[in-house]
C-alpha cells in the first residue's frame, strides 16, 4: 500500500510558481495532478519536474474556462482531495487593455473549478492571490488586516474578487480555502532546470535584468528615481520562488489537517523587508559578476512607490518563513538564464 500523502490538483502547474510548487509537493510525499492550457508555459516542464523529482505528475492539457473539461478532469482523477489554483492571466498592463478577457478568464475558471469541486466533494483549495490587493498602502509594513484598496488594474481586481468569492462560499459550504498574497517572487530552482520563462518581453524586473545581462535585451530601464525612498527607486519585497512554493505546501498541510481557525484565511508571503530596484540591480551584479547597463527613465503609470510585507502571521500560524536572501535569488535567476542560453545554442 502506497503511504503517500493525498492527491493535489495544481492548476497552472506548468507555470513559474506552479512548477516549483509541484516539486515541493513531491518532496513532501504528495501525489500531484497538473491541469494547464500551456498559454504561458511549455510541455517541456513535465520532463524538467521529473528530472528534479524522479516522479512525473499526471498532466491534463485543458482550459478551465470550459466547464465540461473541468468535470471530465475530476471524473478521470477521482483521488483528488485538494486544489492549488494558480491558473490565471497575470500581466497588469495587458489587463488594462483587455479587461473583459481577464475577468472572463480569471473569474470564469475559478467559478468552474469551485462548482466542480463541490459536485465532486473536494473541499480544500489554496488560492494564488497577490499583494496587488493592497494597492498603495497608507502604512508599512502591510499586514493581512491592512485595508484592501480599490484595484489599480483589472488583473488586481480579479484577485480581490477571487478572494471575495472564496470568502462568501466558505461561509455557506464545506469548501475551506486559504489565499496566499505573495509579494514579488523571483529566482529559479537550485537545479536551474525550471525558472521564470516569460513569453515575449518580460513584465517583471528580474527576467529583464538577466535577459539584459546576457544580451537578449538592451539596457535595463529603471522607471523613476524621484520616489520618496533611500535611492529614489521603487521598493518591493522580493521573495525566492522556492520559498513561495514551500508556503503552498504549508497551507495545504494546514487545510488537510483541519488546523484552520476560519474557513477562509489569508496570509502574506514575503520576506518582510523591502529592497529598492537599484539594490536589486546591485545584488545581481554582485552575485553574477556581470556589470549591468541601465538607464533611468520616467515613472511608469500604475507603479506603487513602496510595498513590503509583515509576515509575522504566516511565520507563526503557517509555521513558514522565507529562508533565501536577495543574493541567492539573483544567483539562481542568473544560473537559470545561462542554462536557457546554453539550451538554445544546442537546439
Image (cartoon, helix red, strand yellow):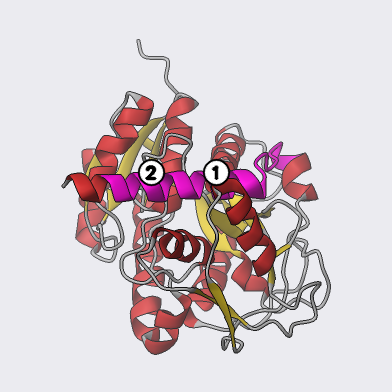
Quadrant into which the N terminus falls: top left
Q: Residue at x 74, y 82 (%)?
A: 227
Decide which of 26, 111 is in the foreground and name it: 26
Q: Do we see residue 207 in this rendering? A: yes
Residue designated by label 1: 248
**Mark 2 burial class by Cα count in 10 Å: few <14, some 14-19, many 20+:** many
The front one of 277 and 194 is 277
The reply to whether dot 1 and dot 2 touch (C-beta < 8 Å) is no
Tell me the number on the disc at residue 194.
2
Q: Position of residue 181 (x, y in %)?
A: 61, 59
**Residue 71 placement (x, y as % from top left):** 25, 52
Q: Is residue 264 visible?
A: no
The chief SS type of the magenta part is: helix
Left or right: where does residue 205 sit relative to residue 201? right
Q: Please report the bounds of the magenta region as a residue range.
A: 317-342
Left or right of residue 227, residue 158 in this image: left
- Residue that appears at 28% across and 30% down: 56
> In the figure, is residue 85 to the left or right of 164?
left
| Image depth: mark 1 or mark 2 in front | 2
Amino acid at each position: 500500500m502506497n503511504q503517500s500523502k493525498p492527491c493535489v490538483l495544481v492548476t497552472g502547474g506548468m507555470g513559474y510558481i506552479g512548477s516549483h510548487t509541484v516539486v515541493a509537493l513531491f518532496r513532501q510525499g504528495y501525489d500531484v495532478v497538473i491541469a494547464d492550457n500551456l498559454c504561458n508555459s511549455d510541455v517541456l516542464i513535465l520532463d524538467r519536474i521529473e528530472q528534479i523529482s524522479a516522479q512525473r505528475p499526471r498532466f491534463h492539457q485543458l482550459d478551465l474556462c470550459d466547464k465540461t473539461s473541468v468535470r471530465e478532469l475530476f471524473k478521470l482523477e477521482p483521488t483528488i482531495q485538494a486544489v492549488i489554483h494558480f491558473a490565471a492571466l497575470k500581466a497588469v498592463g495587458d489587463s488594462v487593455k483587455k479587461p473583459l478577457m481577464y475577468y472572463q478568464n480569471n473569474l470564469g475558471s475559478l467559478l468552474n473549478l469551485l462548482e466542480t469541486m463541490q459536485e465532486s466533494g473536494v473541499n480544500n483549495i489554496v488560492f494564488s492571490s497577490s499583494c496587488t490587493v493592497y494597492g498603495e498602502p497608507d502604512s508599512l509594513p502591510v499586514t493581512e488586516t491592512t485595508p484592501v484598496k480599490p484595484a489599480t488594474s483589472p488583473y488586481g481586481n480579479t484577485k480581490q474578487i477571487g478572494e471575495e468569492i472564496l470568502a462568501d462560499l466558505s461561509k455557506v459550504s464545506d469548501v475551506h480555502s486559504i489565499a496566499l498574497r505573495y509579494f514579488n517572487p523571483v529566482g529559479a530552482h537550485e537545479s536551474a532546470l525550471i525558472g521564470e520563462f516569460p513569453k515575449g518581453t518580460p513584465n517583471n524586473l528580474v527576467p529583464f535584468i538577466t535577459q539584459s545581462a546576457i544580451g537578449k535585451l538592451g539596457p535595463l530601464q529603471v522607471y523613476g528615481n524621484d520616489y520618496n525612498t533611500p535611492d529614489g527607486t521603487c521598493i518591493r519585497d522580493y521573495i525566492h520562488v522556492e520559498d513561495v512554493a514551500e508556503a503552498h505546501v504549508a497551507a495545504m498541510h494546514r487545510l488537510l489537517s483541519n488546523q484552520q481557525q476560519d474557513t477562509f484565511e489569508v496570509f502574506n508571503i514575503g520576506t518582510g523587508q523591502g529592497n529598492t530596484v537599484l539594490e536589486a540591480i546591485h545584488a545581481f551584479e554582485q552575485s553574477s559578476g556581470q556589470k549591468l547597463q541601465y538607464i533611468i527613465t520616467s515613472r511608469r503609470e500604475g507603479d506603487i512607490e513602496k510595498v513590503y510585507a509583515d509576515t509575522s502571521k504566516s511565520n507563526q500560524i503557517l509555521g513558514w518563513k522565507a529562508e533565501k536572501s536577495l543574493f541567492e535569488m539573483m544567483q539562481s535567476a542568473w544560473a537559470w538564464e545561462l542554462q536557457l542560453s546554453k539550451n538554445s545554442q544546442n537546439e
